[in-house]
Image (cartoon, helix red, strand yellow):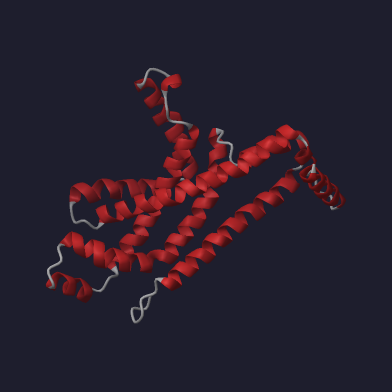
C-alpha cells in the first residue's frame, strides 16, 4: 500500500513536468521494466569478471613467445576489435547457435540461450581490448627489472606471474577501466536478440505508451550512474595499487 502510494505520487509529480511514467502503476509493464533493470545488472556482474579473466589469459598467450599460443589469440583479437560488436553477436547467435542446434538435434535441445551469447560475445570482445592493454603494460616493464628477476632464479612463468603481470596490471588499469565502461554500454546490444535488458524492456513499454522521452531519461541516468561508480572505483584502485617511485 505504501509503495503504491509512493508510485502514484511519483507518477503525478512527473506528469506535471510533462513526463509519462503511468505504466509504473500497472502490474505487467512495471514488472517487465523492473526485470529489464535486473537483467542488465546481472549482465554487468557476469561480464566484468569474464572479460578480466579472459583478457589476462589472452595477454599471457600474446606474450608467451610460443607461436601456437600467440597466433590464434592474435587472430582472434584482430577480428574482434576490428568488427562491430553487434555484428559479432548476430553472427554468433544466427550462425554458431544454429550450428550447435544442428549438432544436438534441434533448437529444443540447445542449452545456449540468448543471454549466454551476450555474455560470451561482449565478454570476449572486451577481453580482447583488455589483452592489448595488458600486453602493452607487460612490454613496458623495464628490462632491468626482468633481468633482476631472472638473476635471482625466476623462471619465465614466475617472471610473468610475479613481476610482469603485477606491474603491467597497474600500468594498464586506466585503459582497462575505460574498457569496463564500454562493457556496460555494450550490454544494450542484447536487445538485438531479444535479451530482456533495460533497453529491450523500455522498447516493449514505449511502443504501447508512447513515452520514449521519459524512458530514455531514466536509461541515460541509469548507465551514467553505473559508469560513474565504475570510474570512481577504478580511480580508487589505481591509487591504492600505485608503486612508489615507479611512476604508477
176 lies above or below 75 = below
Depth check: 82 or 137 in front? 137
Depth check: 202 or 98 in front? 202
Residue 57: x and y, percent? 30, 52
215 lies above or below 226 = above
Q: Quadrant of the C terminus?
A: bottom left
Image label count:
0
- Furthest toward the right, the residue is 16
Place residue 239 in its image quadrant: bottom left
Place residue 173 in its image quadrant: bottom left
Place residue 108 in its image quadrant: top left
171 lies above or below 135 = below
Q: Measuring 15% from the left and 66% from the top, which residue is drawn there?
A: 154
Q: Measuring 45% from the left and 67% from the top, which residue is drawn there?
A: 237
Residue 230: x and y, percent? 52, 60
- Furthest toward the bottom, the residue is 245
Q: Is residue 83 visible?
A: no
- Furthest toward the top, the residue is 105
Depth check: 23 or 180 in front? 23
Residue 93: x and y, percent? 45, 32
Q: Is residue 217 visible?
A: yes
Horizontal side of residue 186 vs 207, given as left or right: left
Q: Quadrant of the N terminus?
A: top right
Residue 192: x and y, percent? 55, 36
Q: Measuring 24% from the left and 58% from the top, which residue is drawn there?
A: 63
Horizontal side of residue 213 vs 238, given as left or right: right
Amino acid at each position: 500500500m505504501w509503495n503504491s502510494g509512493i508510485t502514484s505520487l511519483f507518477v503525478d509529480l512527473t506528469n506535471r513536468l510533462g513526463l509519462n511514467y503511468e505504466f509504473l502503476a500497472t502490474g505487467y509493464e512495471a514488472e517487465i521494466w523492473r526485470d529489464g533493470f535486473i537483467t542488465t545488472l546481472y549482465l554487468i556482474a557476469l561480464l566484468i569478471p569474464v572479460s578480466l579473466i579472459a583478457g589476462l589469459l589472452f595477454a599471457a598467450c600474446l606474450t608467451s613467445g610460443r607461436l601456437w599460443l600467440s597466433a590464434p589469440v592474435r587472430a582472434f583479437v584482430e577480428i574482434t576489435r576490428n568488427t562491430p560488436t553487434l555484428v559479432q553477436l548476430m553472427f554468433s547467435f544466427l550462425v554458431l547457435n544454429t550450428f550447435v542446434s544442428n549438432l544436438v538435434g534441434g533448437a529444443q535441445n540447445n542449452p545456449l540461450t540468448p543471454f549466454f551469447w551476450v555474455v560470451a560475445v561482449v565478454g570476449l570482445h572486451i577481453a580482447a581490448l583488455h589483452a592489448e592493454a595488458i600486453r602493452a603494460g607487460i612490454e613496458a616493464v623495464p628490462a632491468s627489472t626482468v633481468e633482476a628477476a631472472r638473476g635471482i632464479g625466476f623462471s619465465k612463468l614466475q617472471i610473468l606471474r610475479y613481476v610482469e603481470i603485477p606491474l603491467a596490471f597497474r600500468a594498464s588499469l586506466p585503459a582497462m577501466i575505460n574498457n569496463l565502461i564500454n562493457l556496460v554500454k555494450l550490454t544494450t546490444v542484447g536487445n538485438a536478440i531479444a535479451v530482456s535488458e533495460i533497453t529491450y524492456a523500455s522498447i516493449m513499454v514505449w511502443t504501447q505508451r508512447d513515452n520514449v522521452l521519459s524512458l530514455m531519461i531514466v536509461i541515460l541516468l541509469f548507465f551514467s550512474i553505473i559508469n560513474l561508480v565504475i570510474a570512481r572505483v577504478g580511480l580508487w584502485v589505481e591509487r591504492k595499487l600505485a608503486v612508489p617511485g615507479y611512476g604508477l
